[in-house]
């Protein structure tokens, strides 16, 4: 997923930590789907933002504790103090650059629903990705998941990360909303 959302292979490791954090809630709730060739993926899970935060909060605390406490201590055993701060600053900057690749672009929304979204059990579809050079594996997988997972009357929501993706969602039966939000009522 990190490779699919970054412009080239060199930047993918910068986005990897944030990609993992975005995938954890859906994966723990069995909402991560991979196609048989393992070149496409999609996440489709019930939208429960409070539960997501409760899952991510302890994970983030542990990661930040290791990063902010463990890394400088380990580096302090190997290199002098000024190099610790330089290395720490460079790594922190790299992680922040990686985060930029995962934020919504083009006026997108961080939340996939709004006042325009119909009532009903909400499902989020996110993380639609396929490896470069593959042929529509992520989209085919997403369409299969939409046909089999949510029940009739449920609402699937998403945020398109670009104007092009926004149009593609609409071509697949989603209704467009503000800030690149889309929704589809399962029939």
Image (tube, rainbow, N blue to C red):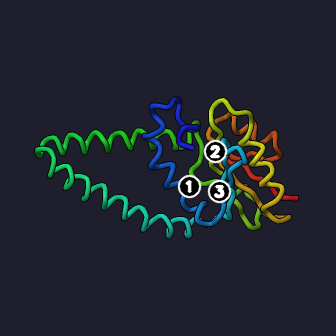
Question: Whole-percent x and y of residue 170?
Answer: 78, 41
Is there a contact, CB below 8 Å, between mark 3 and mark 2? Answer: no
Where is mark 3, residue-wise? 32
Packing grade of label 2 (10 A; few <14, some 14-19, many >=20) is many
The answer to whether 187 appears left or right of 149 in the picture is right
Mark 1 residue element: helix
Packing grade of label 3 (10 A; few <14, some 14-19, many >=20) is some
Distance between the Cα atoms at labels 1 and 2? 22 Å
Can you tell which mark lies on residue 23?
A: 1
Q: What residue lies at 62% left-to-right and 66% top-to-bottom?
A: 29
Q: What residue lies at 75% left-to-right and 45% top-to-bottom?
A: 176
Judge whether 100 appears above or below 126 on screen. above
Q: N-terminal of the two: label 1 or label 2?
A: 1
Judge whether 19 appears above or below 55 on screen. above
In the rendered image, which quarter contains the N terminus? top right
Is 39 or 121 nearer to us in this picture? 39
Q: N-terminal of the two: label 3 or label 1?
A: 1
Question: Whole-percent x and y of residue 88?
Answer: 25, 45
């Amino acid at each position: 997923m990190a490779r699919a959302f970054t412009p080239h292979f060199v930047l993918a490791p910068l986005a990897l930590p944030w990609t993992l954090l975005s995938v954890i809630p859906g994966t723990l709730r069995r909402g991560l789907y991979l196609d048989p060739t393992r070149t496409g993926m999609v996440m489709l899970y019930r939208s429960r933002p409070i539960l997501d935060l409760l899952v991510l909060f302890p994970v983030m605390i542990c990661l930040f504790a290791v990063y902010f406490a463990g890394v400088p201590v380990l580096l302090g055993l190997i290199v002098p103090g000024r190099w610790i701060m330089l290395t720490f600053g460079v790594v922190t900057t790299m992680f922040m650059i990686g985060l930029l690749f995962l934020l919504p672009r083009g006026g997108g929304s961080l939340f996939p629903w709004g006042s325009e979204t119909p009532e009903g059990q909400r499902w989020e579809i996110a993380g639609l990705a396929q490896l470069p050079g593959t042929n529509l594996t992520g989209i085919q997988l997403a369409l299969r998941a939409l046909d089999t997972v949510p029940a009739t009357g449920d609402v699937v929501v998403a945020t398109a990360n670009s104007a092009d993706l926004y149009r593609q969602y609409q071509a697949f039966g989603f209704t467009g909303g503000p800030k690149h939000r889309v929704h589809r009522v399962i029939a």
